[in-house]
Image (cartoon, coloured by chain):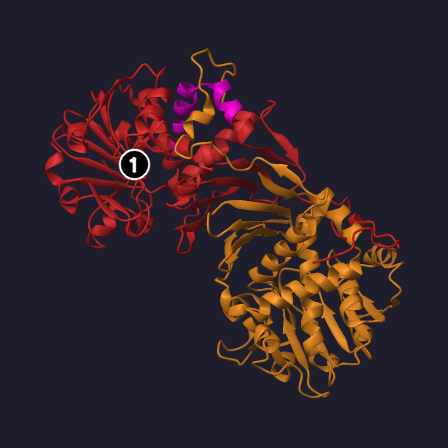
Chain colours: A red, B orange
Amino acid sequence: MVQFVGTRHMIDLVGAIGLDGLFRKLAAYIEDDFARWSEFEKTPRIAAHSKSGVIELMPTADHELYGFKYVNGHPQNPVQGLQTVTAFGMLADVATGYPEFLCEMTIATALRTAATSAMAAKYLARKNAGTMALIGLGAQAEFQAYAFKSILGIQELRVFDIDPSAYPKFMSNMAQSGIRITKAASAEEAVMGADIITTITADKRRATILSDNMVGAGVHINAVGGDCPGKTELHRDILLRSDIFVEFTPQTRIEGEIQQLDADHPVTELWQVIAGEKPGRTDAGQITLFDSVGFAVEDFSALRFFRDCVQDTRFYDDIDLIAEPADPRDLFGLLAISGSRPALALTL
Amino acid sequence: MVQFVGTRHMIDLVGAIGLDGLFRKLAAYIEDDFARWSEFEKTPRIAAHSKSGVIELMPTADHELYGFKYVNGHPQNPVQGLQTVTAFGMLADVATGYPEFLCEMTIATALRTAATSAMAAKYLARKNAGTMALIGLGAQAEFQAYAFKSILGIQELRVFDIDPSAYPKFMSNMAQSGIRITKAASAEEAVMGADIITTITADKRRATILSDNMVGAGVHINAVGGDCPGKTELHRDILLRSDIFVEFTPQTRIEGEIQQLDADHPVTELWQVIAGEKPGRTDAGQITLFDSVGFAVEDFSALRFFRDCVQDTRFYDDIDLIAEPADPRDLFGLLAISGSRPALALTL
């Protein structure tokens, strides 16, 4: 049998663990996997583009576990009440190829993206960072806010969205967070005095959420919303003033903010910082940029984390995804074909 | 919710439909999709190799549906009582990216492989073919036998396996098939007088199941067992005497029997025959070879078929693989985070 964590179980599990502990531990899983980066088989995700969006498979593996995520991105989905991004993922045993763990990842992706952002900021933001600007109050916003509170101790948020109707949802979800929240009248106003700027807008086009004059010395930019060809959030001049950190360079060159730069523009892979091979932030005046697009290793870490969480709990179901004949050569024997007349007429 | 057909439901569904009707209709689905080949987004499968085997993702899509299969190949699995191949697959809506149908495919892959073989033989074997040699009595053997009976009307089988213990399993499973079965003492003996030769051995190495002198004029060879780099079943000289038909040339050059030939050796893609663009068998003396490795479109067809089969039946479960917030921007709201103490202590 394969262990399955569906949406209901994921919701209950998150509630049972609590967000603070969950974000800290999930970030630790991601950090552990980034620290052993060379052990992973890495490839840019495999994308199928259509006129309405993209469907992607994101596989990776170490020597023991194989993982992949199915994820879509359909910017027009909300118009018909559907989510832009849905996802699910799986872990399998490399030694046998048998799937072991199937998991909803719509919620899990939001959690892992936020945990990765905050984990990166731990290395890249100024040590005393206490205020974050949050631009874009869509589905990912609260996850980012809670992760930065849990992992970095962010106490104050300055938030902006072009859609006024996004605020009530956000404020309601943040009511018990203990974070002071200021609604800004513009992106310019939101970034004033912020130590960290997080951009998580979703429009599928080359946008300029941040212009060059909005980014002062010492700021850390957590750029999450730009994540496919033709979709960016930052003005190119900001990139030229920043030290840029990425997940997996070949993928980020295609999908990230740095698609605006020359293909040989210097970037640092985040794992190099975590493994101690390269410095993160080196001085208080430096502008650092985490050009986040999401990488398969983060999903692998999240799947490992949730698999470990649910063992010996009631937060999963066993499902019969894989046939298990007593004699592996006798798959046909499972069918127990009888000589009797078919009971179901095919009308296809 | 996503419709899920697990192993139990698949077994019951196959029993309810009956193998004859199932193979004929499944082959028709595959044939329909081969006939509209250009509508599919096609790519060689994405493989992750380890020392014990391979794990692959096989995606494809038309303008309406996206499908992929997860499948492994671990030749040493049977030693520990596990299957060499397990699989599952999924269909999603291209327009929204939402997954719609999740299906076990260990059994479904065996069914679709056999249906594809028999469908190909309909175009490539002699019209009066009545006898088939079946070499290799592993997990796929009975599926091939039943498919060729259902689709081509094969009445006689000449079978061989190097492992004597494979016969009782095979004979027992075929007891109600109505096919006359002759156990041969060798592969040479099995092919005597056969109109069609099906090879489905599983050893992961360059083997010679058929040598050149074993293949006479007019025979159709259905070569199923060779399906990854370094794994072949036929002597190269047979290939040079045959007209070769493949599924998707770039993948078969890597994985099929034709990995033994020059990269520009002429082959015909099966869809061209089905669409009427190229001839199949042109004379009774010709040797035809279907160099089958399995392609994503066949899995797509099988997923479509089983999805259509289970609508308005009891042969599936609804599972909550995808989160469905009432407001797509309010994914966080699903979590219903309370201020209370976490109930589950993390001990990871």
Q: In terms of image quadrants, where is residue A48?
A: bottom left
Residue corresponding to mark 1: A200
Residue A291 belongs to magenta span: no
Tell me where the magenta segment starts and ends, as one range.
Answer: A11-30
Q: Which chain carries label 1?
A: A
Q: Find residue A154 and report its horizontal and vertical position in percent.
A: 27, 20
> Could you classify mark 1 by the number of other residues whose Cα lies within 10 Å: few (under 14), some (14-19), or many (20 or more)?
many
The image position of residue B86, as x and y in percent, is 64, 49
Q: Where is residue A124 in the image (x, y as percent from the top left)?
A: 23, 31
Residue depicted at x 71% and y 69%: B118
Res B81 seen here: no
Write the residue at 40% across / 46% down: A74
**In which quadrant will I find the C terminus of chain A?**
bottom right
Q: Judge left or right: residue B74 versus residue A35.
A: right
Q: In this view, does B232 lie to the left or right of A63?
A: right
Look at 73% across and 70% down and name the residue there: B198
* Direction top: furthest residue: B340
Give me the residue at 32% from left, 32% from top.
A117
Q: Is residue B49 left or right of residue B213?
A: left
Query: Residue A336: where, in percent of width, then height?
Result: 83, 49
Q: Is the magenta stretch mostly helix, strand or loop?
A: helix
Q: For this rendering, which residue is in front, A89 or B228?
A: A89
Q: What residue type is labelled 1?
A: Ile
